[in-house]
Amino acid sequence: MNAKKISVLNAVKHGDLLTKLSILLMGVGILGHGQMIKGIIVLAFEAAFIFYMVGTGLHNLAMLPSLGDNPGGEVWNEAKQVYEYVQGDNSQRLLLAGVITCFVIAAFIALWIIQMRHSYRLQLLKEEGKHVLTFTEDIKELFDGNLHITLMSLPCLGILVFNIVPLVYMISMAFTSYSKEDEHLILFDWNGLTQFKRVLSLNGNIGRQFWHVLAWTVVWAIFATFLNYILGMVLALIINRKDTRAKGFWRFCFVLSIAVPQFVTLMIMNIMLQPSGAINVLLMNAGLISQPIPFWQNAMLARITVIVINLWVGIPYTLLQITGILQNIPGELYEAARMDGAGPVKIFFKITLPYMLFVTTPYLIASFVGNINNFNVIYLLSAGGPTYVGDTAGQTDLLVTWLYKLTIDQQYYNLGAVIGIMTFVILTIITLVTYRNSKSYKNEEAFM
Amino acid sequence: MENTLKKNRMSPRRRVINLIVHIFLAVLAAIWVLPIFWIVLTSFRAEKGAYTATFLPQGYTLDNYVKLFTDKNVLNFPKMFTNTLIIAVVCCVVSTFFVLSVSYSLSRMRFGFRKTYMNIAMILGLFPGFMAMVAQYIILKAMGLSEGSAVRFGLIIVYSACTGLGFQIAKGYFDTIPRSIDEAARIDGATQWQVFTKITMPLAKPIVIYTVMTSFIAPWVDFIFAKVLCRANADQFTVAIGLWNMLQKEYIYQWYTCFAAGAVIISIPIAALFLYMQRYYVEGMSGAVKG
């Protein structure tokens, strides 16, 4: 073992008295090795942590296994000879407090490791007679070599508090009985994998709906991603043709639809496609149909409609994003193909498509993920409907919109959390398989 | 060679193909523009109600716009507009700082946490947005930010706190700026901070503008976070929830044409910003795909 290597193990083994003292009194090593202010700050953090743990942290941890079981209500007070109202336990609050305490402990351990290593680093510097940075120099360094710490701490804190903590909290709900079913909204318990079994089973009502929704989600994502991609590319090629006039005008017409906020256009589409909406009126006035077309009332028709409208929404995006890349395709490739007598269709499938697939794999994966989580289009267009009696999921519901309905409308928080986790698992598998193998991920540094 | 000589005298076959292509494009363009055209017409429609027997309005009026800004009893649109504007301005400042800081650090600095951060960001991106949202609501409630005017603060936090995860486009752009420029400045004694603010930022003006605009637009077009966080706090509604409410059963007959007017009003500035920044968007995208 190299004693010069900065690690916690070495700090404990080869540290001097001050460094060893830091095991218990954090920051003493830093303080004693010449960085007064930094050491005091670290020590203050330890004091704050102990204060927090004694004050609420330990209680939070103790309540985590049971999540509370006092229902509250009227309790007989022997001394005063009256019934008193006692506030019961709120499992949701207790779970949140428990999760937050776990994060505080994790942060404390991280700080402990950092200060041990830093203390040992300072000790080595001193032993070698090198210069130890003063506090002012440290601050200066934060705007120079350590600029990333200054720039990234706030964004990271935001992500930790408002993304990671909520996610862990939500994930933990999947293992509890937190749900409106059987009135477990205030007091609930851990119940292991019960909800997962319910969702994954092929027999129960929830299980049947889950497999149904999952199948539709995958079908939707495939259609939405690849139809948009290919048709958008064809449109881009047509507009970029040498003989097409007024290229800018055509592009403007399509791009205009992105410029209008998506939720506005989607709500308008929903109204236009109602039985007495503009489209049916137009078709009936023209004498093409005698009965209104039930765009949202028939399951099959509703599915086709959302896919078609998603083309309306998505094609301009594809057009905008890939026009530039299309122009980068080496012209010689086309020349050579034309020399060999290939027609436009053959050129598209043999040259354009493979080249584009090669260059835009990350974009395709991102849009596939985006489509699986495409809440807006489904929720605002069909609201997941039509829904059969007794189901919580409609015929066009994706996993995300079903998750929304389960948590916000039905308050089945545990089931919603399970659906969220399943979505994540599916996306992870898809992404890992494709993204990890793509060239642009492996060669990230190559383009710098 | 042939093309340049016969530019104006094409063979009949090519003429037919060109005609077909242009007709095809015209039909498609009509399909794309029609709903937008229809909403503009509806905003000037004199008859009330969402469903009419004719496709084109029978009479035209400006009353819908007037009502939108003067009728404050049921749905207070001017108030919603101010709410959204305040949220958008604050979010714009915070998110721009977050996105540019993270992108610059990831693109230009090399530190141990860098790959980990990018992997974590990728993993977090795979969770459905709502999973965090329900819990965010509970956390904001525990912090006392779910009632009254604190909702506004809660919305600002929700919109801007996690923007550090959306670094891809800006990082892709920074990656295309040659590093030799930074190195030259470093040799001349510039600190990293000076390189960031005095060299990279001016060079990356397109992506700065792009980031500012996207983060300004976000609160105007999101309705789902706002709906969950505002619940019944009608004074805190943003424009998007207001418009969504106008289409609910109890309001739709009276408010449908006003909805169209509101949609037109918020679409105009957003459309203008978008059309202006479209090329930055394309540049950012091609940068991101390349990197």
Image (spheres, coloured by chain):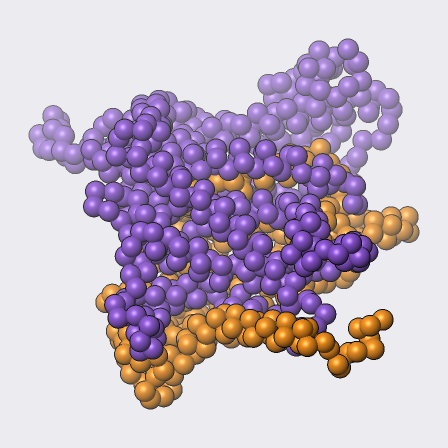
Question: Residue A194, can we see it?
Answer: yes
Q: Is residue A382 left or right of residue A6?
A: left
* Above or below, comparing residue A282 to residue A382 in the picture: below
Q: In this view, does A374 lie above or below B131?
A: below
The quadrant in which residue B113 appears is: top right
Q: Colour of chain A?
A: purple
**Residue at 31 percent of width and 51 percent of height:** A299
* Quarter of the rendering containing residue A202: top left
Q: Which residue is drawn at 63% across and 52% down?
A: B99
- Residue A280 in the image: x percent, y percent? 32, 70
User: A27 above or below A265?
Assistant: above
User: A128 or B42, which is in the foreground?
Assistant: B42
Q: Indicate the colour of chain B.
A: orange
Q: Is A303 displayed left or right of A426 in the figure?
A: left
Q: To which quarter of the image does residue B205 belong?
A: bottom right
Residue B42: x and y in percent read: 37, 79
Residue that appears at 33% across and 31% down: A199
Residue A393, given in percent of the width and then of the height, sits at 30, 44
Between A74 and A92, the one lying in front of the other is A92
